[in-house]
Amino acid sequence: MPHELIDPRDTLERQNEKLLKIADTLMRRAEQGTEASGAAYAQFQRAVMLEEEVRARTAALEKALDLLNESNAKLAQANAETEAARSNLTNAIETVQEGFALFDAQDRLVMCNSRFCKHMLDIYHQFKPGLRFEDYVHLVSTSPYLTLPDGETPEAWAAFRMARHKDNHAVFNARIAGRHWLQVSEHRTPDGGTVILQTDITDMMRLERQERERLLDDQARLIRATLEHLNQGVCIFDDQNRLVGWNRRAGELLSIQANHFRLGTPFLSLYDRVRDNVRFRGDTGPEDVEAWVASKAKRAPLSFEIEIGVDRTLAAFAQQMPDRGFVISFTDVSAERAAVRTISQANETLEQRVAERTLELEDALAEAERANASKSRFVAAASHDLLQPLSAAKLFVASLENDLEDPELAERLSKAGNALVSVEKILGALLDISKLDSGRATVDLSSISLKDMLNQLNDELKPLALKKGLDFRMVCCDAHVESDASYLRRILQNLASNAIRYTDSGKVLVGVRHRKSYVRVEIWDTGPGIPEDQQERVFEEFQRLSASATPNEGLGLGLAIVERACRLLKHPLHLSSQPGRGTCFAIELPRSNVVPLRKPRDGATTNGVPLEHHIALLVENDEALRSAMTITMENWGLDVLPCANQSEAEDILREVDIAPDVIIADYQLDEGVLGTDVITALRNDHGPIPACLVTANRSPDLQGACEKQGTSLIHKPIDPAELRSFIEGALAG
């Protein structure tokens, strides 16, 4: 059969050759075998059919071969285009001025250009495709061409580099071979790979260093010119107590020749030249100055006076500099001291005359004070002794209210109870007046929300006004004032209740007017008014202008308490009135710059103030808490400067030369340092920066100190929402 004679694996030419040979053999046999002509014809037919099948198979194979050739041609074209693209990409990254490297998602090197790590000659040849990222970091960290900062090991640098590799974007600088600087920028690709760019910033760093040196030279010339124009003598010493700067005025005041001032002269050498001519005044002596100069610890400023010669007195002031050197300035105060001596001599002649008159006045004043104190003690003692039996009487009266069934007796009992309440109020008022007069009253100034206080008074007094048929209105505001909360509430309550008590018809209005540095609370009524000749008397004890007022309505002590309390708090009190038209009492309250920090309600959202590109200085001695707070605030977008103490905070601010936007400080730091003192010191150096104190101390004294300092207060454990509310409020302000 044909499929047994022809091998399909043969080429078409070989198959055709076999078929032709078979056909020729069959034809020859048909011609030679006459008796087998029938079989020969059958074989011929079979050969013809086989030939047709061979032609069909040949055509199919030729078509398949054409398709294969076409596919091979397209594949070759695609390979050529791929190679061209790869060549173009290689040429492109070679034209890039920066060093370029591409790592795939498995952190294996795909390609890099010739500028990548070209300064590291020892490992340059090892950057081949397939290199693992961690191997690349190891090679760089151990290369002698990488210049590490003092104290940093290759292992620490490698750990830092691997940590930055986890970020989607990282930029840092590296010093290469001691003279070159590279800025390394790492970016993440969409498929999870990594692109690294290395930019040579050596020229930029050199220009920056030259500019810094130029600025330092300019500053040195400016400082020199400034020193020479000062009327004070100034000497500057380095951390080794060697002279590094001075002006001519110092030599003139100390009587030291100019040629003795030389760079590097020790402090003691200069002091030896004036030791015999110097006399110290006051408690500070030469041994104190020498000990201060020799001290290696942090030195507090030192002030003292010295006398040189017969009539020259110098005031000296020594202060340590940040680099542990120090500056000593000398001011000629001879004229001032001579004037003081002259005035002292003149005063001696007057003292005797004044002493005689003073003794007379002291005797008269002592007698008046004894009389006033005796009166105050009597009123205070009487009030206190009467309040106790009065309270017992009230309890007895209250116990009888439910036992009396006779309406007439019940009414009498009710009147007796009201009378006792009136007596109790009068005695309480007398006790308040005695405290104010005796000088024993103390005030606790704090920031007070005027809106909250007026709302409380509105809830208390409005029912009384409505009972009399009066229109009672109170207009509040969001101002915060500085006052004593207890006394201020008593003042406003007395003024408003008096307005209601003496107004028979019309209305009572309590409102607030805003001024630049204070707010003015006014209480208006449509009562009978106060004649001008009686307006001074209303502030005296037991003065009531309404003859029809009953003892239950008071005995005229309320305004006396108001006047004394306003005087104690230094709140100006004003009165204006027109008979028949009404009266207005007004009190001026100073504004408070400290708004008490309020904790946001549950579910409250932030006010949307962006925190990015703002700097927060954190001073916290507990390392774990400092780290947690730093991470929290950095997640909000803040740039955080974490510090453990005041010295570290001052060093880092001096290094970055930028003032922070907010300060967050712990209250109790190491070595007994308080956060409030740190905030004060930083504000003295950098201005009124918004600050917040974090503490577990909940004492009222600390809260008062924070309000006085203008510092917000957050208690531990710290609520992140409360902390963010403070920061956003500080940045928004």
Image: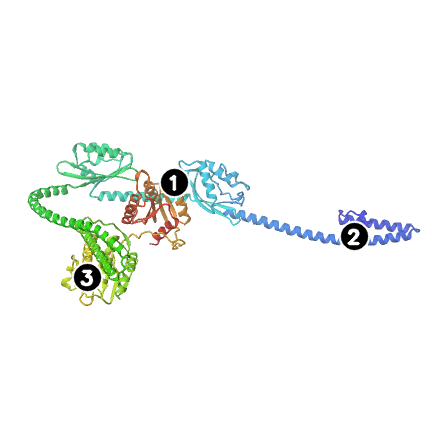
Closer to the camera in the image, 597 or 645: 597
Residue type beneath disc 1: Glu
In terms of image quadrants, where is residue 561?
A: bottom left
Question: How far separated are the C-alphas under marks 1 and 2?
Answer: 91 Å
Which of label 3 and label 2 is nearer to you? 3
Visible in this render: residue 657?
no
In this view of the protein, which residue sits in the foreground, 238 or 730? 730
Q: Hey, what amino acid is under mark 2?
A: Val
SS at mark 1?
helix
Q: Which residue is mark 1?
A: 623
- State which tag comes first along the sequence, 3 or 2: 2
Q: Position of residue 586 (x, y in %)?
A: 22, 60
Which residue was labeled with disc 2? 54
Q: Looking at numbered disc 3 in the image, what kind of residue is underneath it?
A: Thr
Mark in the foreground, 1 or 3: 3
Q: Nearer the viewer, residue 270 or 535?
A: 535
**How many angstroms separate mark 1 from mark 3 (CA)?**
69 Å
Secondary structure beneath dot 2 equals helix
Separation of marks 3 and 2 at Cα, in angstroms: 139 Å
Crowding at label 3, few (<14), some or many (≥20) Cα neighbours within 10 Å?
A: few
